[in-house]
Amino acid sequence: MSKIPMTARGADKLREELKYRKGELRPKIIAAIEEARKQGDLRENAEYHAAREQHGFNEGRIQEIESKLGSAQVIDVSQMPASGRIVFGVTVDLADADSGDEMRYQIVGEDEADAKSGLISVNSPIARALIGKNEGDIVQVMTPAGARELEIVKVHYI
């Protein structure tokens, strides 16, 4: 099985969710199933069926998280030498060559991506164009709005 890159923060978030789902949510759902069972005929018991559905969803999510953590290659960029080269996990300050607009992105794993928060997937067009480049380079990125030139202003290893 191939390793999936993930930041240390992303792995920590998954571990927290797993702990919550196993330690808090699972016992609550099991208690709800038991309570619904006591109400009688299970074929017509909506609470029982809803609790069983919730249980199935929770168990599926637990398996998904365990699988992701099991195949994760956790990369802590703060332990890397600050060479100015863009690699997975770095935070990059960019400037649009045409408009001068500045933006900041961190290159993260697929599951961690949230463009509104400045977290872009390693598989996104911008990240693919940036990987391997250095501070001061200008890269051309194809976006839905067309080609854009972005200058790499600063690379942060945080």
Image: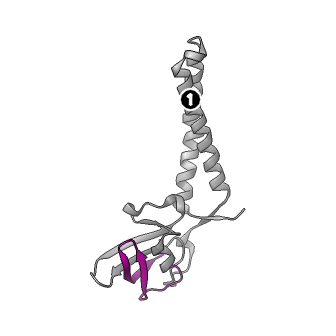
Q: Position of residue 135 (x, y in %)?
A: 44, 86
Residue lying farthest right? 1
Residue placed under numbered mark 1 in the picture: 29
* Rendered location of residue 158, percent (x, y): 47, 71
What residue lies at 60% left-to-right and 16% top-to-bottom?
42
Considering depth in this image, is 129 or 65 the residue closer to the camera?
129
Q: Amino acid type of disc 1?
A: Ile
Residue located 37% across and 61% down the image: 116
Hey, which residue is sitting farthest left in the picture? 99
Q: How many numbered discs sit on the rendered protein? A: 1
Protein image colouring = one colour
Residue 28 belongs to magenta span: no
Q: Quarter holding the N terminus? A: bottom right
The percent coordinates of residue 41 (x first, y second) are: 59, 12
Q: Which residues are magenta?
A: 130-158
**Which class describes the residues within 10 Å of circle 1: few (<14), some (14-19), or many (20+)?**
some
**Element at label 1:** helix
Residue for point 38% across, 80% down = 147
Q: Residue at x 38, y 61 (%)?
A: 117
| Viewer-closest of 92 and 147 | 147
How far across and down, in percent of the image, does residue 70 sit? 68, 55
Question: Is residue 154 positioned above or below 123 on the image?
Answer: below
Measured along the vertical axis of the image, is residue 77 above or below residue 19? below
